[in-house]
Image (cartoon, rainbow, N blue to C red):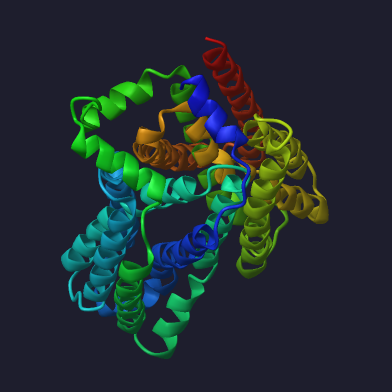
Amino acid sequence: MTLSDHQATITNYEKPAFGAWLVVGLLCIVGCLNYLDRVMITTMRESIIDSVPMTDAQFGLLTSVFLWVYGLLSPIAGYLADRFSRSRVIIFSLFIWSVVTWLTAHATTFEELLATRALMGLSEACYIPAALALISDYHKGSTRSLAIGIHMAGVMIGQSLGFLGGWIAETYKWNDAFTVFGGVGIFYAVILFFLLKDAKSNALAMNTSELSPEHTPQLSFATALKNLFSKKSFSILLIFWGLLGVIGWMILGWLPTYYKEHFNLSQTNAGIYATGYIYPLSMVGVVLGGYLADRWSKRNNKSRIFVPIIGLCVAAPAVFIASSTDMLYITVGGFMVYALTRVFSDTNLMPVLCMVVNKRYIATGYGVLNMFACIVGGLGIYASGALRDAHVDMSLLFKIASFTMVICAGLLYLVKKDVERSIDT
């Protein structure tokens, strides 16, 4: 990153126009729809299996194939958002998502359902890198982290509304949920076609690139990857985000079991204690983490690195204490703190990435980070299950997670030092 690029990132504090916030609002709805579908299918398991006979392993494969396709295609999807119009990639993604959602409602065999989930992974892979890059294009100064935090809150609303799938499946038919949301998505894609546009500065840069190729290197996927991995900070961010993915998936996946076994709770109560506060506090956390980073950025240009570091340094001891006590209310309190502060990293990852890499490659870079987190996160879930089979105490796993969060904070500090060195040179 050049000094001028870095200064442009940290010194532009003018208030963004109304259109910049409109983009955030429009994308919040897309993010909500995307993540609603991810969770919805898991809440209607019994209804789907009654209609389309399959084993539990096959039902699990429906989510696994989505995650594999989503993760593996994220870098290429990010590249498309860097190479072409970000807004058009988003609209295309939503349209394909909507059509696939509608087709899911008409699946009558396991193979058809599996195919729709794979296609869903393709459509959703195109969304997040393009959406966060587009928000970053519009919010260049002291509103970038907050804007991304608000968008992430919309994503979490979609996750928390996943129960609608189960309700619709029980009240009507499981197919109806996919028919309704597929139709909503198609209608909303038409609205976005008229309202969602690329930021003028990014569109101008792309047009200049196309008009003067002799002055601007042609953007290719290989060139983007080479540029990204030439930055030491990007490789550190890759490790950071992968480790954080392991932590997030492990805690979210095994916390209900921990409450049930450690405190001898019923399955229902364990589920409430494990999930009842996670999404509400995480929604507050992504907005709070964005607000604090933006406000602090007016005085300290490394605030978007420091805020996630502080969040992790608060979350780590909270998880350690929560997994070291036999008092239920202390455990609940510790994981509440974790839910609130760990997500400071989620809302500031793209702003930090904008400080680390060339702005032409930010969507590709986020796609690579996303892919690695999915792969490592999946391996982490498997490894924690294997440790469970080996009768390893789950409280020990959570203590390891708390220690890993400290390592993640240290990795972010290394990113800060490397950014400072790149500016000095």
Residue 284 seen anywhere in this rendered image of the structure: yes
Using residue 334 as the reference point, say whether residue 77 is left or right of it.
Answer: left
Front-lying residue, 375 or 202? 202
Which residue is drawn at the image coordinates 36% and 21% (left, top)? 229
Front-lying residue, 122 or 273? 122
Relative image position of residue 407 (x, y in whole percent): 62, 25
Which residue is drawn at the image coordinates 76% and 50% (left, top)? 331
Residue 182, placed above or below residue 95: below
Which residue is drawn at the image coordinates 42% and 46% (left, top)? 133
Using residue 407 as the reference point, say whether residue 316 is left or right of it.
Answer: right
Residue 391, placed above or below residue 63: above
Displayed quadrant of residue 103 = bottom left
Front-lying residue, 275 or 59? 275
Using residue 286 as the reference point, say whether residue 67 is left or right of it.
Answer: left
Relative image position of residue 399 (x, y in whole percent): 67, 34
Displayed quadrant of residue 304 = top right
Residue 274, placed above or below residue 186: above
Q: How many marks?
A: 0
Residue 247 seen anywhere in this rendered image of the structure: no
Relative image position of residue 74 (x, y in whole percent): 32, 44
Front-lying residue, 351 or 232? 351
Residue furthest out toward the top? 425
Which residue is drawn at the image coordinates 33% and 39% (left, top)? 205
Relative image position of residue 125 (x, y in whole percent): 32, 51
Displayed quadrant of residue 166 = bottom left
